[in-house]
Image (cartoon, rainbow, N blue to C red):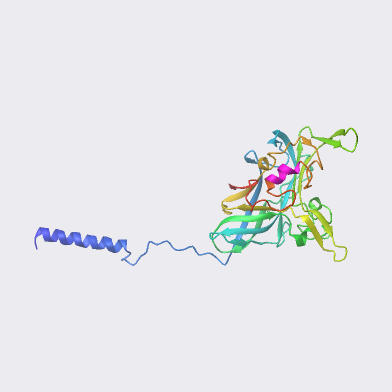
């Protein structure tokens, strides 16, 4: 065999080996295996209170709040979360089974940021809860949806006899109205200038006073009870829908952005209803708040399918 023939045969053998390797001819495979998930997976959803791009808490003044860039002290910040679903890769909503503990039952979780630090937050140490826990079927998930509110079946129960977390007096409204779904209270430096105009007099008369706190209390309105059956009904449900299409609970947390919520509100002034917004349909201070919550103020119905900018996903 001459040199040219030997060289040709060598090249042929090398080429064949390369083809076999590329096609997996050696018996091994370079194809990535599909992920294997357990039947159920634990889920922890972390929440934080955000202002000016950083987490905030009791005892530390918050600058730049509202349309007048007011400095304010946090007084209260709590909300109920219910109807929690993760969104799988096929855009299907998969319910999260909540784990029962002092802060949640199988239907609702109470998130509370109030630790009692500082005079505005009470000055007495309080436990906090910033994490919702539960389980979901094993799968890949890409987002989350939930409601700020209490399920109707639990909303009108008597807090004095209810089990945790429905037994918190500070989150009870009145017996027929049920619970405060969201309670945010700020004490602006200098207080709130409360102006009231009495149009029943001629000429109209105006009175002024000063309040310490600008409140946001979200809850159902127009609630009545049937004298025969005892059943409750509310004209305005006022439950906020939240949907974060891109959210990874392993690497991200959910921030309630106070700048976004109060962007259209003057925290130094109040002209109608309770100081701030307590979900009154004729309260002028509720207009901007409900626009941020994406709830239609006159009807109490969601204004969008969870698309909003108050709750945002951020890296842990």
- Whole-percent x, y for residue 154 in the image: 77, 60
Number of dots carrying numbers = 0
Residue 42 vs residue 295, the one in the foreground: 295
> Does the rendering let one see residue 156?
no
Q: Is residue 217 magenta?
A: no
Tell me the quadrant of the picture where the N terminus can be found.
bottom left
- Whole-percent x, y for residue 218 in the image: 75, 49
**For the magenta stretch, what is the residue range?**
285-291
Asked if residue 174 is positioned above or below residue 31 in the image, the reply reads above
For the point 60% across and 58% down, the residue is 86
26 left or right of 117? left
Q: Is residue 290 magenta?
A: yes
Direction right: furthest residue:
201
4 left or right of 260? left
> Does the rendering let one see residue 6?
yes
For the point 62% across and 50% down, the residue is 307
- Whole-percent x, y for residue 280 in the image: 79, 47
- Whole-percent x, y for residue 112 in the image: 72, 50
Q: In which quadrant of the rendered view does residue 94 lie?
A: bottom right
Residue 166 vs residue 86, the one in the foreground: 86
Asked if residue 109 is positioned above or below residue 75 in the image, the reply reads below
Residue 297 vs residue 162, the one in the foreground: 297
Direction left: furthest residue:
2
């Amino acid at each position: 065999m001459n040199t040219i023939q030997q060289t040709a045969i060598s090249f042929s053998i090398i080429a064949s080996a390369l083809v076999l390797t590329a096609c997996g001819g050696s018996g091994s495979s370079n194809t990535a295996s599909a992920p294997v998930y357990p039947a159920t997976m634990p889920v922890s959803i972390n929440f934080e209170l955000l202002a000016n791009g950083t987490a905030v808490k009791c005892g530390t003044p918050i600058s730049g709040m509202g349309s007048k860039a007011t400095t304010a002290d946090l007084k209260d910040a709590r909300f109920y979360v219910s109807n929690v679903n993760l969104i799988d890769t096929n855009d299907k909503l998969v319910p999260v089974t909540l784990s029962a503990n002092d802060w949640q039952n199988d239907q609702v979780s109470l998130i509370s940021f109030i630790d009692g630090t500082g005079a505005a937050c009470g000055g007495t140490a309080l436990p906090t809860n910033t994490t919702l826990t539960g389980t979901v079927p094993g799968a890949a998930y890409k987002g989350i949806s939930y409601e700020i509110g209490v399920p109707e079946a639990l909303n009108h129960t008597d807090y004095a006899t209810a089990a945790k977390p429905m037994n918190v007096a500070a989150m009870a409204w009145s017996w027929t109205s049920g619970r405060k779904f969201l309670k945010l209270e700020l004490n602006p430096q200098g207080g709130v200038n409360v102006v009231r105009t009495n149009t029943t007099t001629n000429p109209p008369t105006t009175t002024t006073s000063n309040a310490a706190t600008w409140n946001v209390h979200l809850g159902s309105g127009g609630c009545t009870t049937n004298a025969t059956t005892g059943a409750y009904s509310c004209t305005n449900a006022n439950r906020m829908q939240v949907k974060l299409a891109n959210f990874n609970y392993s690497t991200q947390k959910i921030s309630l952005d106070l700048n976004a919520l109060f962007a259209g509100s003057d925290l130094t002034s109040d002209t109608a209803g309770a100081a701030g917004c307590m979900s009154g349909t004729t309260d002028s201070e509720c207009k901007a708040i409900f626009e941020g919550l994406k709830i239609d103020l006159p009807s109490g119905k969601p204004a969008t399918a969870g698309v909003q900018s108050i709750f945002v996903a951020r890296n842990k």
